[in-house]
Image (cartoon, rainbow, N blue to C red):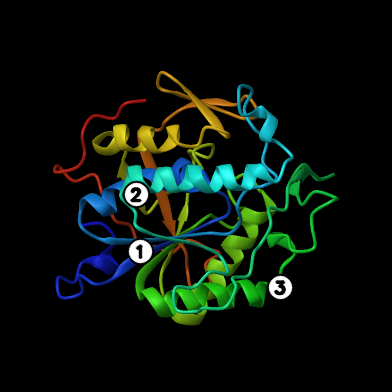
């Protein structure tokens, strides 16, 4: 069993909807979950808020893309490659709809800077169409439209701090929480790897799908490099792919943890905990 909400054998049509901010977030934060869901036969829908056009680029042959219009196209292609590796076939950017012939609404990467309180905030030169500056109601409406089209049983996004605080991450969390509140769908929030003291309600072992996730990560060539088992990000941060992904079930409204606790460390999928 994965999510309790997917335990009804009569509802194999139900999907899990993941809500992320930029290309590469989906694999870094939830790659193991997506690979597990696909392997177990569930439908996976990914919505990405922006095309990541303000992102830094790792040193190397693609560095010249940083700050250029071509970076967005490169990151879109990288995301498509990662989805192929993970086996996810339903991806759309926020503002796109498979049932709407109208031109999609495009949300731009807000960029970020460190504010006076030591938290990440939008860059001073964030464009007017930046995701973090968009009306929350508008972003929620876009998510509700995807929910209507795909009928998910579960929503997955960041915690209330947006992980490390990127304003686009926070906006996607806030919109996911509001959509959860309006629809009654459960919201599972990613527990940041940097916060091991946080209690998780779901724990996904990475080992059964480690190679799949690493192949998906390798697609994001502008954002990271792989050095053996280490992931080196564009800012030089280095970490090893964790042995588990952890998720916390939000209460109604998506901001506080509920008391539900489910173990996913079942014998069929557990495997050794490799750090």
- In this rendering, would 236 be left or right of 157? right
Q: Are marks 2 and 3 in contact (CB under 8 Å)?
A: no
Gap in Å between the C-alphas at discs 2 and 1? 10 Å
- In this rendering, would 24 be left or right of 62? left
Gap in Å between the C-alphas at discs 2 and 3? 30 Å
Q: Where does label 2 land, which residue?
A: 33
Report x, y in % for residue 268.
14, 43
How many numbered tags mark residues here?
A: 3
Gap in Å between the C-alphas at discs 1 and 3? 25 Å
Q: Earlier in the sequence, mark 2 or mark 1?
A: 1
Determine if residue 127 is in view: yes
Q: Earlier in the sequence, mark 1 or mark 3?
A: 1
Q: Are marks 2 and 1 in contact (CB under 8 Å)?
A: yes
Q: Secondary structure at mark 1?
A: strand
Q: Secondary structure at mark 3?
A: loop
Q: Around disc 2, counting alpha carbons within 10 Å, would you say few (fewer than 14), some (14 to 19), or many (20 or more)?
A: many
Q: Secondary structure at mark 2?
A: helix
Q: Earlier in the sequence, mark 2 or mark 3?
A: 2
Q: Is residue 175 above or below residue 61?
A: below
Determine if residue 203 is in view: no
- In this rendering, would 168 be left or right of 201? right
Q: Where does label 1 land, which residue?
A: 16
Q: Which label belongs to residue 135? A: 3
Q: Around disc 3, counting alpha carbons within 10 Å, would you say few (fewer than 14), some (14 to 19), or many (20 or more)?
A: few
Report x, y in % for residue 76.
53, 49
Closer to us: 253 or 44: 44
* Residue 177 found in image quarter: bottom right
Which quadrant of the rendered structure holds the N terminus? Answer: bottom left
Report x, y in % for residue 6.
25, 66
């Amino acid at each position: 069993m994965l999510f309790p909400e997917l335990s009804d054998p009569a509802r194999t049509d139900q999907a899990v909807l993941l809500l992320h901010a930029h290309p590469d977030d989906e694999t870094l934060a939830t790659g193991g979950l997506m690979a597990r869901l696909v392997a177990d036969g569930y439908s996976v829908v990914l919505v990405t808020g922006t095309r990541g056009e303000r992102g830094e680029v790792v040193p190397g042959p693609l560095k010249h893309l940083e700050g250029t219009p071509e970076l967005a196209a490169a990151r879109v292609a990288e995301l498509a490659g990662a989805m192929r590796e993970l086996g996810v076939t339903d991806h759309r950017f926020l503002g796109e709809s498979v049932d709407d012939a109208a031109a999609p609404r495009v949300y731009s990467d807000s960029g970020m800077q460190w504010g006076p309180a030591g938290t990440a905030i939008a860059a001073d030169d964030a464009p007017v169409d930046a995701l973090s500056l968009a009306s929350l109601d508008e972003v929620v409406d876009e998510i509700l439209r995807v929910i209507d089209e795909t009928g998910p049983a579960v929503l997955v996004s960041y915690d209330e701090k947006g992980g490390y605080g990127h304003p686009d991450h926070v906006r996607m969390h806030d919109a996911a929480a509001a959509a959860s509140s309006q629809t009654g769908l459960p919201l599972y929030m990613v527990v940041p790897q940097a916060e091991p003291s946080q209690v998780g309600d779901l724990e996904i072992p990475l080992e059964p799908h480690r190679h799949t996730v690493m192949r998906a990560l390798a697609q994001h060539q502008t954002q990271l490099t792989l050095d053996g088992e280490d992931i080196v990000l564009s800012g030089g941060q280095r970490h090893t792919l964790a042995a588990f992904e952890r998720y916390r079930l939000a209460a109604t409204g998506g901001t506080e943890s509920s008391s539900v606790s489910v173990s996913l460390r079942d014998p069929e999928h557990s495997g050794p905990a490799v750090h």
